[in-house]
Image (tube, grey):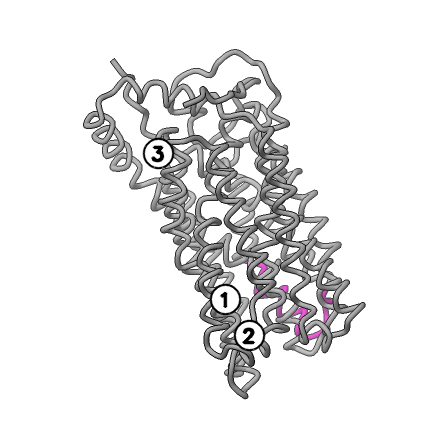
Amino acid sequence: MATPRTAHEAGTPEPGPGPAAGPDGPAAAPASNGRRELLAGTVGGVVESFDWTIYAVLAPYFAAQMFPGDDPVTKVLGAYLGFAVGFVVRPFGSYVMGRISDSRGRRFGLMLSMGLISGASFLIAALPTAQSIGMLAPALLVVLRLVQGLSMGGENPSVAAYITETAPKRLRFLYSGISYGGIILGNILCFGVLTLLLTVLGEDGVADGGWRAGFVVAGLLGLASLWVRRAADESEEFTRSSERAETETPAAARAERRRLYAGSARNMTAVFLMTLGVTVSYYLGTTYLPQYAENLGLTSGAAGTGGMIAPLLLLIAAMAGAGIVADRTGPAGAFRAGTALLALLTVPVFSLMGSGVLPVWAATVLQLLCLAAPLALANVLFARLFPVRIRVVAMGLPFTLATGLFGGTFPLLAEALTANGRIGLVPWCAALAAAVSFGASFLAREPVRETAAS
């Protein structure tokens, strides 16, 4: 097997509270600013987010074609259920894809996940309707969503590990914010594409098959991202850890992994609970909010989706700012401040929006600004809690489990509450979840260290 290319870490340790700078000993001499690796992680985040979120924003439009039956509410709920089931396999994908990334390398794992999710998007665009093939249409749609869920399960933890291991230490959380900003940019592209489709085709045209164009765009973006990622270097920190592992017997390597997993149980619990509130607030603020506003009669169609673009651009800038602050003062305080604001302000902001005191755009901006710091810092903050040898799996399993249980099901829960006349409970659910994440931030401890190979 060819020797992987490597990218060196540079810079000085960042000040402030938070996990230790690294569980695997001192870094190598500076040789790279990590920008090419940052681009590979960020552009992948754009495509993965677009491919994933385009389903959610198009679900109300393709539901009538892809799900059989006569009740439009049931069809939309079925479409959102298809969104949720993709999260079911995320923990499994995090383990399978994470083991690949932890053994074959971050770069290999990132290329594989991108290929899977992009190919699935092309196939969704070509699916026959329920009128043509009956129940087979939603069944095939669910299968392809499961493939995308498998891919996404390994994608974000692999990006988190990759950025953590290749970013200059003094810029780690800025790079974390920028790389996760790619996911927000993917959301912006989703809303932009949907706005364009609604403007050109109208709601009836999008529902009558125009929605397929969104999935074609997703697949094409994936091909472009594969081209960018093929030029990225492997993480040097991963390479050093792999070289140490190669000197061990298989039995010793398995025993070492078991020891590391056992020693990381507390931090895995912390990541699960810290993710809970962030993922609920994320899907409320970036995916479901236009539908929420439409359910209240505050906006509709292209106006609702187009109105998300400017607030999301502001969120990207705020995330970069939060990363800069965390690189200077430490990530723990910034993460806690953001989750505390989400817990305290979500209900008042949504109540003021519902009563007409706050316009939808202002409520959206306030919600997303509260979300900026936890969202920007989570990738590197979580990844640094674990040793390199198990980093992707140990971070990915609790992260994807919380995302699947609480984030992926949130649009379905919100729509079900709305259908039962309890739309006012939606922001309360998000606020409670954020409070849990705030408390869980005090649970994390420094990572267990790898045993040096003899």
Q: Earlier in the sequence, mark 2 or mark 1?
A: 2
Q: Which residues are magenta?
A: 344-360
Real-space Cα separation, disc 2 to disc 3, in angstroms? 40 Å
| 201 versus 263 height, above or below | below
Q: Give residue 213's position: percent from left, percent from top.
A: 68, 62
The residue that appears at 55% across and 82% down in the rendered structure is 73
Disc number for residue 397: none
User: Nearer the N terminus, badge 2 or badge 3?
Assistant: 2
Residue 3 in view, yes or no: yes
Q: Nearer the viewer, residue 246 or 340?
A: 246
**Residue 66, disc:** 2
Query: Label 1: how many residues lie within 10 Å, few (<14), some (14-19) or many (20+)?
Result: many
* Secondary structure found at label 2: helix
* Contact (Cβ within 8 Å) of mark 2 with mark 1: yes
List the residue tagged with mark 1.
141
Closest to the observer, 196 or 322 = 196
Quickly name the residue at label 3: 390
In this rendering, which labeled residue sits more in front, label 1 or label 3?
1
Is most of the magenta stretch helix, strand or loop? helix
Q: Position of residue 157 (x, y in %)?
A: 46, 41
Q: Residue at x 80, y 68 (%)?
A: 200
Residue sitting at the far front? 132
In the rendered structure, which disc, 1 or 3, sits on the residue that comes first in sequence?
1
Q: Is residue 332 visible?
A: no
Q: Is residue 349 magenta?
A: yes
User: Alpha carbon of mark 2 to alpha carbon of mark 1: how far?
Assistant: 8 Å
